[in-house]
Amino acid sequence: MKKIVLFFLLISSVSFAQEIALLKYSGGGDWYANPTSLPNLIKYCNQNINTKIAPKPGLVEPSSPDLFSYPFVHMTGHGNVVFSPSDVENLRNYMTSGGFLHIDDNYGMDEFIRKEIKKLFPNNALTEIPASHPIFQKPNVFAGGIPKIHEHDGKRPQAFGIFYESRLVLLYTYETDLGDGWEDQEVHNDPREVHEKALKMGANILNYIFNN
């Protein structure tokens, strides 16, 4: 039934807007960081890659049955993350049934989220995604893989993934901070080209989800 619901969302008539959501998790981390990022990404994608996404993103908790209403769920923050056993079961079922989770480290999340990802998929390794992967090829080409948006610790940006039955179901972006780049430009005073680069990479992520 869950697969049918997600499949319907992906092929629904253009007269019905698709919806994406932000994940409200527990543990004390600021899940609410970057409030303008998803609305800006939605607007960009609707204008540039012909998506029909509702302008206001949803808000969903990891253990909620409403999770299955969204083909794409975004998660961000700077601090601690804790998934309960019910969160783990529901999130895993969501992703193995066709859903997609994007986790974007907003600086400070890494040490916590890796342990929680291991809970979600104890038998699937979190592996770096090569620049040759389709998510970096369409509709915008990122020949070097995930772009660098904010400096953080000055490390190279990396995109990690969990693959289930050869399908990318979880994307973890580290040392890039796409969400900051999606925010209103005046929030971080990003140059226009950096803001645009972040939005283009976000468009690639949504294009991959809706077309694979």
Image: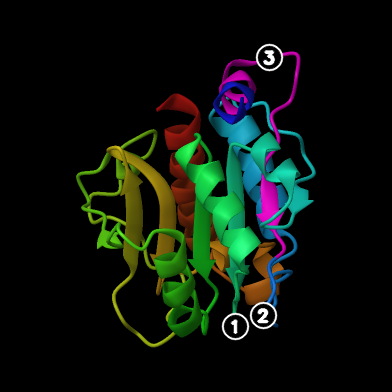
Q: Give residue 184's position: percent from left, percent from top.
A: 69, 62
Front position in the image: 124 or 113: 124
Neighbor class of circle 1 (other Cα within 10 Å; few <14, some 14-19, many 20+) is some
State the residue at coordinates (68%, 67%). Answer: 25
Indicate the quadrant where residue 15 lies: top right
Q: Is residue 119 visible?
A: yes
Front position in the image: 148 or 79: 79
Contact, CB < 8 Å: mark 2 with mark 1?
yes
Neighbor class of circle 3 (other Cα within 10 Å; few <14, some 14-19, many 20+) is few
Q: Is residue 168 magenta?
A: no
Does label 3 or label 1 sit earlier along the sequence? Answer: 3
Q: Give residue 60's position: percent from left, percent from top.
A: 74, 53
Foreground mark, 3 or 1, reads 1
Q: Is residue 44 above or below residue 81?
A: above
- Gap between marks 3 and 2 measured at Cα: 38 Å
Q: Is residue 36 above or below residue 134?
A: below
- Magenta-tinted stretch: 6-24
126 on left or right of 59: left
Amino acid tagged 1: Asn
The residue where tag 3 is placed is: 14
Q: Is residue 170 above or below residue 71?
A: below
Amino acid tagged 3: Val
